[in-house]
Amino acid sequence: MAALDPKAILAGRPPGRPPVGVIVVIAVSSLCLIVTLAVTAAEGPTFAEGLLLALLPLPLLLAGVLSLDRLEPEPPDALVLAFLWGAGVAVLLAMVLNTAGLTLLWAPLLGPDEGFAVTAVLGAPLVEETLKGLVLVGMLWFRRHELNGPTDGIIYGSMVGLGFATVENIHYYTVAGPDALAATFVARGIASPLIHPLCSSLTGIGVATAALAPRGWSRAWPVLLGLLGAVIYHALWNGAASVGLDATAAVYVLGVAVLAGLLAVVRADRARIVALIGRYLPPYQAAGVVTAPDVPMLSSLPARRRARERVRAAGGPGPARALRDYQQAATELAMLHRRADRGLVDRPAFELRREPLLVLMLAARQSFEPLLRPPR
């Protein structure tokens, strides 16, 4: 195990640091985030309080999103990239484009009040959801192997949305001023913290669906439909506030229904992955990569956790970490087979991805297998 780089193998990249493109995007996003925060700090007297209030619910929200990702965890660098894109590039460009649209187009055409309303209901949803979705489309081009199903799209979409919502909330808390700060926090930080993640998750599902579709226009339509759903719900949410309490309540209930639907999709996708494990891994028993008890263990999150706890108690964190790598590599292997069966991976690419996974699984097994044997 010491000679291997499990993180690189599981992420499907060469050993060592993340790719240069990932580093560049993270750096650019971080710079955009710094510029956005600097501009926001000059907008009102409650920047420090707004920063604290925006960050306060973030650990809980991140934990909720990442809890959906336990069966096949996404690479940390990709999650960080998605979050920072939403918090940096998407927010900064949205500020510029929304302001330009209001100042140069809608206000001159319709007047200040009507122009602001049109910007909020039509312009901002289209601009913001498109900007958030760009990083997801980028993953479709450059890291398509990470998009193995709708859960992955929901995870990445939620990370982008959380980044965007966090920085947007800092802006609203800052301009609210001391008198309205508490009410603004209740409205945005407690009552509706998931609006942006919900919207960008719809785009994420479309992108993940496209990643599993054949080449051509069959990949474009899911992305466009997902983006359309995100824009429509965002527009409904922004427009409901100007209509009245009943409209806001109706859109809120719709959001709860969308959230329930996303959770149902995650549950169904988890069952699909479990079925793939049961279908594709048993043939590897002959090579000693998988044993008969492994399949039920790999097919259940509680069974995976119990196995790691047992290994940790008997051998410490090293073998437990090896077992965790084995579990994830086995899941990646099953999904790789599924992609190959659907014609999304040619034979050379399949072998190039499969061999490191098998090497990692065999090396990990040497570390934890003696600790999982039943006592005599």
Image (cartoon, rainbow, N blue to C red):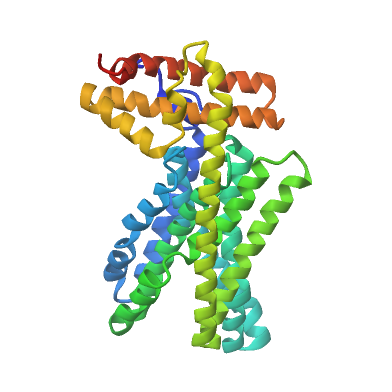
In the rendered structure, the answer to whether residue 139 lies left or right of residue 182 reads right
Task: Give 69 or 146, whichever is nearer the viewer.
Answer: 69
Q: Residue furthest front?
A: 376
| Position of the N terminus by quadrant | top left
Q: Residue at x 51, y 27 (%)?
A: 13
Relative to 46, residue 12 above or below: above
Direction top: furthest residue: 287
Measured as percent of width and height from the top left, residue 28 is found at 47, 48
The answer to whether 80 appears left or right of 130 in the picture is left
Q: In the rendered image of this protein, does residue 171 appear above or below residue 281? A: below
- Seen in the picture, residue 306 relative to 6 is either above or below; the reply is below
The residue at the point 75 percent across, 39 percent down is: 215
Q: Quadrant of the C terminus?
A: top left
- Residue 23 in the image: x percent, y percent? 46, 39
Name the spot of residue 226 as percent of width and height, x first.
Answer: 64, 57
Residue appearing at x 38%, y 54% in the figure: 64
The residue lying toward the viewer, choosing from 41 and 335, is 335
Determine if residue 353 is in view. yes
